[in-house]
Amino acid sequence: MPTGTVKQGQVIVDGTRIAGTAPENAQVIDVTGHYLVPGFVDIHNHGGGGASFTSGTADDVVKGIHTHRLHGTTTLVASTVTGDMDFLAQRAGLLSELAEQGDLAGIHFEGPFISPCRKGAHSEELLRDPDPAEVRKLIDAARGTAKMVTLATELPGGIDSVRLLAEHGVIAAVGHTDATYEQTVEAIAAGATVATHLFNAMPHLGHRAPGPIAALLEDERVTVELINDGTHLHPAALELAFHRAGAGRVAFVTDAMDAAGFGDGRYMLGPLEVEVADGVARLVEGGSIAGSTLTLDRAFKRAVTIDRLPVEDAVAALSANPAKLLGMSDTIGSLEPGKDADLVLLDSDFDLKGVMRRGEWVVEPQLG
């Protein structure tokens, strides 16, 4: 609950919503000894279940969405990767249809407006400076469903693009950037409010040149994404982020690619080939980390068992904070009457035992 954990409480589901009072003859499911938490909200996700949001068909995207629902993600923003502008506009059209149907919460464009110095798993020859006119082209192609654009704001046109995004109600995220501390402060002042996978694909925190990490952590207007898979971040880095930003400004994300919930093997991430081995995705050429195979139920369990975060802080990072960022706090993100009946059931070891989305079980309760 927004006020904290309620012991021996009850959640009443009536239709698609959480209700304040139980209807007559309501079915009772006894989940004593379990945690019931709000459905997870992922604002940075490229695919799963062997399906890609960046290049797959509409059916492929639906398959990927369903894969993550099986792991507790009841609200999902689909992320693209760097590509040709016409192709990205085409992808936006396909993804926007699914958003309009309620399958997706919106679209996140990660690239092509990023730094070649910090490109990660993005094709360098397709990168470009963030021209506001081209940023606007992608927003328009998304037909009102664009939620976030990741930019290297130090590039020519970066600050003007941040202002454009802010004017249109789209989140400007600082990421895949080679910006200095001062340049990042300028971007935040212009309206940037998210750090795309903080620490990754940006200059390291330095004692003379603190870079973007310090600027993003210190500003109360910024929400920082963290990929809590044990590969992208050392536990001390995660602890630093929570200590400096506070639990109210962290959003756990997966940055998942096709292999999430599917397995090791060879995959394509945009135009680049990826090898997944032991659950870690890396580019075949160069070896850069290429997204993740993370699902948010694993991020939750790691947060409370390995990182020793309070359950309430993990829930905030997985549900309440990203819901607020998306402007959806009135319908998702916490267990309150009137909100969508999006629930995740966890046992005492924090293993997933049930998922409900809008009043229907996606994963039937496993209470044996």
Image: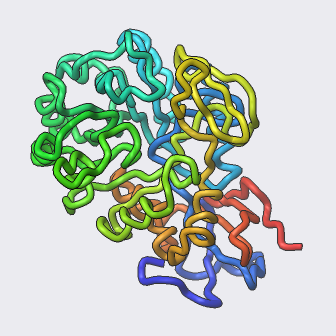
Residue, x 58% and y 71% (percent of image)?
A: 304
- x%, y% of residue 1? 48, 78
Residue, x 24% and y 49% (percent of image)?
A: 193
Instruction: Determine the residue located farthest toward the bottom in the rendered image.
Output: 8
- x%, y% of residue 54? 53, 24
Q: Nearer the viewer, residue 298 or 241?
A: 241
Residue, x 64% and y 31% (percent of image)?
A: 258
Vertical position of residue 151 compared to residue 69: above or below: above
Q: Is residue 87 left or right of residue 16?
A: left
Quarter of image, res 244: bottom left
Q: Is residue 165 left or right of residue 5?
A: left
Is residue 171 among the parts visible in the rendering?
yes
Coloring basis for residues: rainbow
Q: Is residue 127 left or right of residue 2?
A: left
- x%, y% of residue 241? 36, 62
Quarter of image, res 224: bottom left
Q: Which quadrant would the C terminus be assigned to in this image?
A: bottom right
